[in-house]
Image: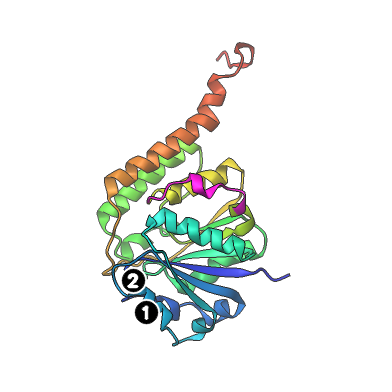
Amino acid sequence: MAKRIGIFVIAYNAESTLTSVLERIPDEVIEKTEEIFVIDDCSADNTYGVGQSYTNSLAAAKLTVHRNPINLMYGGNQKRGYAYAIERGLDIVVLLHADGQYAPEVMQNLLEPLEQGHTEMVMGSRMLKSGNALRGNMPLYKFVGNKILTTTQNWLLNTSFSEFHSGYRAYSCHALSTINLERLTHNWHFDTQIILEFLRRNYRITEVPIPTYYGDEICHVNGIPYAYECIKATGQFAWNTRWRSRTTLPSSQRSTE
């Protein structure tokens, strides 16, 4: 049975890029998609109006545009989008950024593992193919920071992801429905927290390579607090799920090596 697919376009001050992003979604993906929903996070520009007036491609027929009455922040807007996807009874939801940083053209690569039932979450990785990120003009400081953060998080979690910090994702809505999303942050490290929630439940997470594009979009992330919160959340999770369980074993069950 075909999966019911939704594309969630997360938008903030994206009036200059939203139209292009919608037009770049492949027709073959649009044809099997039930709804493309834009959620404008109370932008200061005309993102909502641009979305409402959009009529230029196949996407327009399946497009709905929503606006948060107050700014919910990055994590808060994702919470609203996933709750909407679950309420609509969708099977799969893709997170696509309206600023054009992630390529709609490769969306089928994210969808395929979920459509085939091989995973519960797909992360598009800019680091999976060596050199792709820098060739795509990722600033060197972002590249180095991403590598350091990812290496640290992999060490804490005993995982081997190529990247924790891509915002191009696709999820099983059933898996999302088992998570209390309201307990997660409204801030930027929501993306790390949701990975941790999937790991907590032993859900399968798949990475696929995606191209990297850095243009004129404005970065709203403050790097140092973001890194701190990611490491803090990952460390707490690792302590609670790995190290704490080792140190709380009865003495007769602890290794004597």
In the picture of the structure, the residue carrying the numbered disc 1 is 50
Q: Nearer the viewer, residue 103 or 182?
A: 182
Crowd band around label 2 with a 10 angstrom C-alpha radius: few (<14), some (14–19), many (20+) = many
Assess whether mark 1 and mark 2 are in contact (beta carbons under 8 angstroms). Answer: yes
Magenta stretch in the rendered image: 177-187
Q: Quadrant of the N terminus?
A: bottom right
* Direction from residue 6 to residue 23 in the image, left or right: left
Q: Residue furthest front?
A: 69
Question: Which residue appears at 47% of the width and 46% of the height?
Answer: 184
Give the label on residue 89, or none.
Answer: none
In the picture of the structure, the residue carrying the numbered disc 2 is 14
Q: Secondary structure at mark 2?
A: loop
Q: Nearer the viewer, residue 160 or 39?
A: 39
Q: Quadrant of residue 199?
A: top right
Crowd band around label 1 with a 10 angstrom C-alpha radius: few (<14), some (14–19), many (20+) = some
- State whether residue 113 appears in this view: no
Question: Which residue appears at 31% of the width and 48% of the height?
Answer: 145
Q: Position of residue 21 (x, y in %)?
A: 41, 75
Q: Position of residue 157 (x, y in %)?
A: 49, 38
Q: Quadrant of residue 137?
A: bottom left
| Residue type marked 2 | Ala
| Image: 137 above or below 149 | below
